[in-house]
Structures are given as structure tokens and as C-alpha cells.
Image: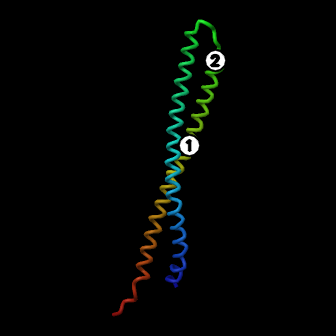
Amino acid sequence: MAAVQQEAALPQDAVGQGLLELLTPAVQQLDVHVHTVRESQVELREHIDSLATELCRINEHQKVALDLDPYVKKLLNARRRVVLVNNILQNAQERLRRLNHNVAKETARRKTMLEESGGLFSRSPSKP
């Protein structure tokens, strides 16, 4: 009876294994893209900081009073949004890493189960 139940479970394990194998590369690729976007966000934030500093320096050295404060405020607001998006991406990347780890762990577990159950089915009853 147990062998029949294990045989019935094998197609489900095969489907699950197939899904895991299908999802693993997608999760890894998404993780790489998120990492790339995060690097771009950091670079953008650094450029915004540099530009804001330069605008403040120009404003201090101008003989004619130009009001650059609204532009500096806009840059700082853009920087705040970039930091916010970067934090969201960082959280998403961490979730992706955990998902990828869980997928790998589940794949290994299922592979072990399949190998063990395959060994059970390949044995014939021993003859004394």
C-alpha cells in the first residue's frame, strides 16, 4: 500500500521539481537585475548630491543674486525619492535571495526524496 502511495506521489514531485527548475533561473535573473538597478540608484543619488553641492557653491559665488534654492530643493526631493526606491529594491532583493535559497533547499530535498524512492522501486524482493 505504501509503495502505491509513493508511486502516486512521484508525478506530483516531478511537477514540483519541474516548477522549481523553471523558477530558479527566473529568480536568479531577477536578483541580478535588481542588483544592477540598485547600483544605478546609488550612482544617481551620488550625482544628485554632487549637483546639489555644486548649485549651492555657484549660488554662494554669484555676484547677481540668483535664487537657486527651489532647484536645490527639487534635487533633494529627487534624492529622497531615489533613496526610497533604493530601500524598496533592497527589500525586494532580500526577499528574492530568501526565495532563491528556499527554492534551492526545496529542490535538494525533492531530489533526495526522488532518489530515495527510486532506490525503493528499483529493488526487487530479495530471494532467500
Q: Nearer the viewer, mark 1 or mark 2?
A: 2
**Above-or-below relation of 89 to 6:** above
> Please, what secondary structure does the residue beneath circle 1 have?
helix
Residue 86 quadrant: top right
Residue annotated with mark 2: 69
Which residue bears the numbered disc 1? 89
Q: Residue at x 39, y 84 (%)?
A: 123
Residue 112 disc label: none
State whether residue 19 is above or below residue 71: below
The quarter of the displayed image where residue 88 is located: top right
Q: Is residue 48 left or right of residue 117?
A: right
Identity of the residue furthest to the top in this view: 63
Residue 64 placed where, x, y %? 62, 7
- x and y percentages locating residue 97 in the rendered image: 50, 51
Q: Where does the C terminus fall, quadrant-wise?
A: bottom left
Relative vertical location of residue 31 with respect to residue 43 in this rendering, above or below: below
Other residues around mark 1 within 10 Å, as few (<14) / some (14–19) / many (≥20): some
Total marks in image:
2
The x and y percentages for residue 106 are: 49, 63
Q: Is residue 69 left or right of residue 22?
A: right
Q: Secondary structure at mark 2?
A: helix
Instruction: Residue at 54% x, 68% y: name it.
Output: 16
Who's the residue at 56% across and 46% down the image?
92
Specify few, some or many for label 2: CA neighbours under 10 Å numbering under 14, 14-19, or 20 or more: few
Foreground residue among 20 and 109: 20
Residue type indicated by callout 2: Asp
Q: Inspect the image, locate mark 1, and give the three-letter code of the amino acid beneath it.
A: Leu
Q: Nearer the viewer, residue 64 or 89?
A: 64
